[in-house]
Amino acid sequence: MTTTLEQHASKADIAPELIETDVVIIGAGPCGLFAVFELGLLDLKCHVVDILDRPGGQCAELYPEKPIYDVPALPIVTGQELTDRLMEQIKPFDPVFHFSERIDQLSRDADGRFRLVTDYGTTFLTKVVVIAAGGGSFTPKRPPLDGIADYEGSSVFYSVRRIESMRGKDIVIVGGGDSALDWTLNLQPVAKSLTLVHRRDEFRAAPHSVEKMRALVADGQVRLAIGQVTKLVGDGGQLSSVAIKTADGEETIPCTALLPFFGLTMKLGPVANWGLHLNENLVPVDTERFETSEHGIFAIGDINTYPGKLKLILSGFHEAALMAQAAHKIVYPDKKVLFQYTTSSSSLQKKLGVK
């Protein structure tokens, strides 16, 4: 498995792919990650797509350091720790991740397989789709700047798909969380200039990232501005500069690429247009297979609804286990599943690399 930023870099100048796989999982939160494990035990190959630039979903993005107390056998675990443990657990199954991509189109081909297309152009052909998208798609929050929509997609970006696309640009990154700091560190080597803007001189990012950023500032390779962007200057969708208001007043600095990281909001997103039955923006499923109204499309975790539903991570794990059994019957209709326990099955232990 590649790391988030390594994967972004590897996508540079690569044409969108056509990928055939057993299962496509939409969402890399805890339920989506555990689904990889359960499907892997049954020899089902997974590709995982997430609009975020890293695994973990809400756990890692919204409360990475917030303690969680109701995960079995873990009296206390943070959202990031849980994500890290799940990523370690699924390593034997070598899933392929597609970060910073959103499934925009879903249709069924004549052979019965699903065709999914992302906003990046990646196309999947798969027999099974698992929606594990939490409360829906994360959508970046737009800064309250006049005319910003005119620059979006050309010189204002809420994520970075290709590091090379930022080479030689005057980059301004706005924010104080992990995304802002990570991209400050990773884009500095390719930028003509890079300015990090945050409203205060305190950051919510990982301490080692903050230390690296401050070292670059001290070395003159990155500029840190404590304040906020107040105005965009440009023409025809291309920025030339931005105005920044600081304690010392307002100044204008060169900017040909603005990256605002102001957090995310949750919306149901494209799922609403896939022809599935919906109930108050949730996807109804049965409780035997956790299948939706469309055969071969399953929904697990917070995105689904059924009588007695509890929006708990442990409930999503249970749903993933039953979903995997049903998915196997679709991918291998003539192959009977012999139910086994990981504690006693030598074949399962061999898959996990423990025997």
Image (cartoon, rainbow, N blue to C red):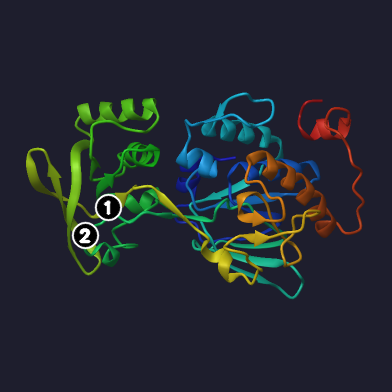
- Left or right? Give the position of 264 relative to 282: left
Q: Nearer the viewer, residue 192 or 65?
A: 65
Which residue lies most toward the left here?
Answer: 249
In the image, is residue 310 above or below residue 341? below
Q: Nearer the viewer, residue 271 or 102?
A: 271
Q: Position of residue 45 (x, y in %)?
A: 72, 49
Q: Position of residue 20 (x, y in %)?
A: 69, 59
How far is disc 2 from disc 1 in space, using C-alphas?
8 Å
Q: Is residue 291 visible?
A: yes
Q: Position of residue 180 (x, y in %)?
A: 34, 41
In the image, is residue 331 above or below residue 33? below
- Left or right? Give the position of 149 relative to 335: left
Instruction: Give the amino acid at mark 1.
Output: Leu
Q: Which residue lies under the disc numbered 2? A: 239
Instruction: Give the amino acid at mark 2.
Output: Leu
Q: Which residue lies under the disc numbered 1? A: 258
Disc 1 element: strand
Q: What mark, if any, has residue 120 been given in the picture?
A: none
Q: Position of residue 270 (x, y in %)?
A: 54, 65
Residue drawn at (92%, 51%) of the image:
336
Q: Nearer the viewer, residue 267 or 223?
A: 267
Mark 1 neighbour class, 10 Å CA radius: few under 14, some 14 to 19, many 20 or more: many
- Left or right? Give the position of 230 relative to 313: left
Residue drawn at (52%, 58%) of the image:
102
Quarter of the figure with the N terminus: top right
Residue drawn at (18%, 38%) of the image:
225
Q: Is residue 104 visible?
A: no
Disc 2 element: strand
Q: Answer yes or no: do the residues labelled 2 and 1 have beta carbons within 8 Å?
A: yes
Quarter of the figure with the C terminus: top right
